[in-house]
Image (spheres, rainbow, N blue to C red):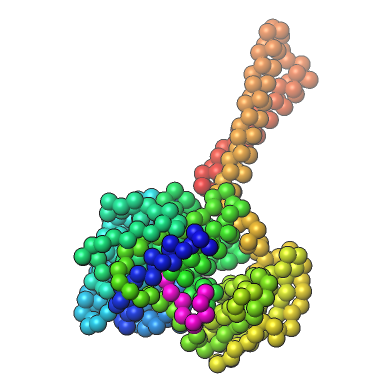
């Protein structure tokens, strides 16, 4: 908690105009990436979830939230320019929120089209948008590199860089990972680990002071802590980072869960993870953690859901129906206990133990290719050695000798083909 105090104090220094009345958002999800990228499965659905929570709880008018799925780079540039124009024409304070989920490296977003959209260009465009407050959330591999653009340096997870520039009235950039880290998505969450927790935070899980509002600092701290915890056991732990350049007083409120038309309340009690999935159990909608010190409210839209309480050895499962204006307590549900061998979603693994490493398939196939290559070298050598031995006898091969030589030659051909196939498979999985 002592580590968190500096960030909490610094994040309180938002622009007094941060209570933006006019809100605009550009939300981008790109599964495809570049030619050598392994396509993502959930970047587009991450974008749609982010857009939904902004409209439902963030007071972003639906007609002011633009969602782009696998867009061309020039389309993104045009939309950023249009956002800047709209914000500049608006009287009064404005907030522009830009979200990206997709492939990237330490320099460039991997979007279709030329010229490529670099992280430095994106940072400059965010800075130049004519709005009172600008917030960027980048969920991509090595996204933390954007924090070092414009002559700055990447910041540690709980370090705050406040820049006193007269030309900057308010800019905050949050990233899902550091400058040299991968960002992970998982089947169990049907999305990115960071975006899942950021959205869950906006739905109420991050409302630490229980005032019915979730600020930018609360949502970041919640997503940071849960992402770091969920990826700690993987080969590439994620540590979300941020750059904060907001001046003034007040808090930037990102969502109002208290205004939701339906709520699931987790009463005070021992810490346990509660996951809400859709009625078909195919999509994780949100999650929260019960707390001994406070109630936790998860804001939802009216509908049918399945609530899963994650226990050490089992899942407590209960179907629920939330109507408009309903406020349902977890304590009132009738749970059925099932062994914890499945996941939060049918057919998927349990998140919170080990998140699947995005390169695990590559290492497995590449290792098999190495083993097959060694077998090819051995059988090929034996084929040449046997042929030379028989040739030195100066007579035709006997039937047994021919069979032996043919066997080694056949084994060499098979292992050669297997090595080639596995090498191609390794290239594909990479």
| Quadrant in the picture for residue 313 | bottom right
User: Which residue is at 59% across, 89% downward?
Assistant: 327
User: Which residue is at 69% across, 69% downward?
Assistant: 310
Q: Which of 240 and 361 lies nearest the eye of the viewer?
A: 240
Q: Which of 10 and 391 lies nearest the eye of the viewer?
A: 10
Whether residue 121 is in magenta: the answer is: no
Q: Locate residue 32 relative to residue 227 in the image: left or right.
A: left
- Tell me if residue 3 comes above or below residue 273 in the rendering: above
User: Which residue is at 60% across, 57% downward?
Assistant: 355
Q: Locate residue 223 relative to residue 104 in the image: left or right.
A: right
- Tell me if residue 236 comes above or below residue 329 in the rendering: above
Residue 68 in sight here: no
Q: Position of residue 335 (x, y in %)?
A: 74, 79
Q: How many marks?
A: 0
User: Which residue is at 43% across, 53% downward?
Assistant: 156
Q: Position of residue 422 (x, y in %)?
A: 59, 41
Q: Position of residue 52 (x, y in %)?
A: 46, 78
Q: Position of residue 245 (x, y in %)?
A: 32, 64
Q: Locate residue 301 relative to residue 249 in the image: left or right.
A: right
| Quadrant in the picture for residue 404 | top right
Q: Which of 404 and 357 lies nearest the eye of the viewer?
A: 357
Q: Which residues are magenta?
A: 208-216
Q: Main secondary structure of the magenta part?
A: loop
Residue 344 in sight here: yes
């Amino acid at each position: 908690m002592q580590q968190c105090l500096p960030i909490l104090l610094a994040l309180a220094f938002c622009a007094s105009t941060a209570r933006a009345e006019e809100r605009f958002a550009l939300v981008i999800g790109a599964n495809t990436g570049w030619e050598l990228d392994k396509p993502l499965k959930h970047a587009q659905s991450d974008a749609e979830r982010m857009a939904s929570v902004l409209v439902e709880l963030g007071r972003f008018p639906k007609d002011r939230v633009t969602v782009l799925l696998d867009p061309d780079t020039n389309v993104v540039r045009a939309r950023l320019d249009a956002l800047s124009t709209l914000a500049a024409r608006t009287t009064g304070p404005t907030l522009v929120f830009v979200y990206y989920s997709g492939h990237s490296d330490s320099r460039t977003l991997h979007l279709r089209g030329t010229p490529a959209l670099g992280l430095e260009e994106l940072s400059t465009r965010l800075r130049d948008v004519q709005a009172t407050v600008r917030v960027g959330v980048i969920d991509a591999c090595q996204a933390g590199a954007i924090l070092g653009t414009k002559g700055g340096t990447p910041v540690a997870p709980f370090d705050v860089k406040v820049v006193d520039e007269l030309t900057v009235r308010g800019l905050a950039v949050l990233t899902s990972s550091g400058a040299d880290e991968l960002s992970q998505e998982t089947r169990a969450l049907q999305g990115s680990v960071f975006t899942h927790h950021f959205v869950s935070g906006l739905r109420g899980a991050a409302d630490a002071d229980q005032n019915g509002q979730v600020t930018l600092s609360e949502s970041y701290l919640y997503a940071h802590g849960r992402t770091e915890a969920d990826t700690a056991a993987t080969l590439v732990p994620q540590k979300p980072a941020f750059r904060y350049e907001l001046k003034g007083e007040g808090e930037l409120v990102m969502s109002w869960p208290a205004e939701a038309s339906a709520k699931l309340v987790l009463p005070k009690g021992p810490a346990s993870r509660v996951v809400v999935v859709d009625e078909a159990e195919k999509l994780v909608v949100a999650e929260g953690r019960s707390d001994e010190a406070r109630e936790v409210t998860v804001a939802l839209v009216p509908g049918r859901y399945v609530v899963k309480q994650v226990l050490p050895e089992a899942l407590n499962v209960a179907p629920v129906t939330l109507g408009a204006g309903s406020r349902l307590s977890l304590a009132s549900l009738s749970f059925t206990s099932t062994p914890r061998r499945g996941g939060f979603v049918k057919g998927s693994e349990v998140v919170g133990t080990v998140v699947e490493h995005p390169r695990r398939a590559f290492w497995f196939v590449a290792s098999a290719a190495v083993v097959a290559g060694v077998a090819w070298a051995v059988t090929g050598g034996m084929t040449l050695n046997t042929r030379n031995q028989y040739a030195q006898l100066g007579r035709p091969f006997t039937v047994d000798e021919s069979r032996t030589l043919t066997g080694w030659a056949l084994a060499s051909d098979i292992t050669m083909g297997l090595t080639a196939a596995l090498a191609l498979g390794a290239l594909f999985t990479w």
